[in-house]
Amino acid sequence: MEKQIQKIKYYNFSTNICPSIQKEKLQKMNSELSNSNLTKHQELGQGLVFIKQLTHQMKGNLKIDQGSNYISSSFEVPIQLYT
């Protein structure tokens, strides 16, 4: 019996990572995150580059947002549910 895809859900995870930063630096970081060939970037650090690579392999998205006194990273990956 063949499994059928019921629907695709997206999982979103967010966490605070540091105090707020300049708007230009935030834009540069998000620009780097959209680069699928990214292997290393000084402003992102190795941790975010690693998470970005995993998220990309899972066909998801990673971005950095700024709050009033912090920035947070969040990722969204599709999850297929089978019936």
Image (tube, rainbow, N blue to C red):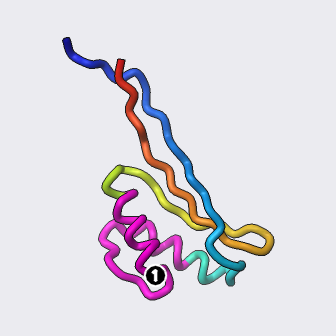
Residue that extends furthest to the bottom in the rendered view of this protein: 42
Is residue 3 within the magenta segment? no
Quadrant hosting residue 20: bottom right
**Residue at image coords 41%, 65%:** 52
25 above or below 35? below
Of 52 and 36, which appears nearest the observer? 52
Quadrant hosting residue 34: bottom left
Q: Mostly what secondary structure, the magenta segment?
A: helix
Residue that extends furthest to the left in the rendered view of this protein: 1
Figure quadrant of the C terminus: top left
Is residue 50 within the magenta segment? yes
**Residue at image coords 34%, 74%:** 38
Where does label 1 land, which residue? 45
**Residue at image coords 35%, 23%:** 82
Magenta-colored span = 28-55
| Percent coordinates x, y for residue 19 in the rendering | 71, 79
Classify residue 13 as left or right of residue 80: right
Of 8 and 28, which appears nearest the observer? 8
How many marks overall? 1
Q: Describe the element under mark 1 as helix, strand or loop.
A: helix
| Percent coordinates x, y for residue 81 in the rendering | 39, 27
Residue that extends furthest to the right in the rendered view of this protein: 68
Residue that extends furthest to the top in the rendered view of this protein: 1
Figure quadrant of the N terminus: top left
Of 26 and 15, which appears nearest the observer? 15
| Percent coordinates x, y for residue 26 in the rendering | 60, 77
16 above or below 25? above
Amino acid at pointer 1: Gly
69 above or below 61? below
**Residue at image coords 51%, 44%:** 11
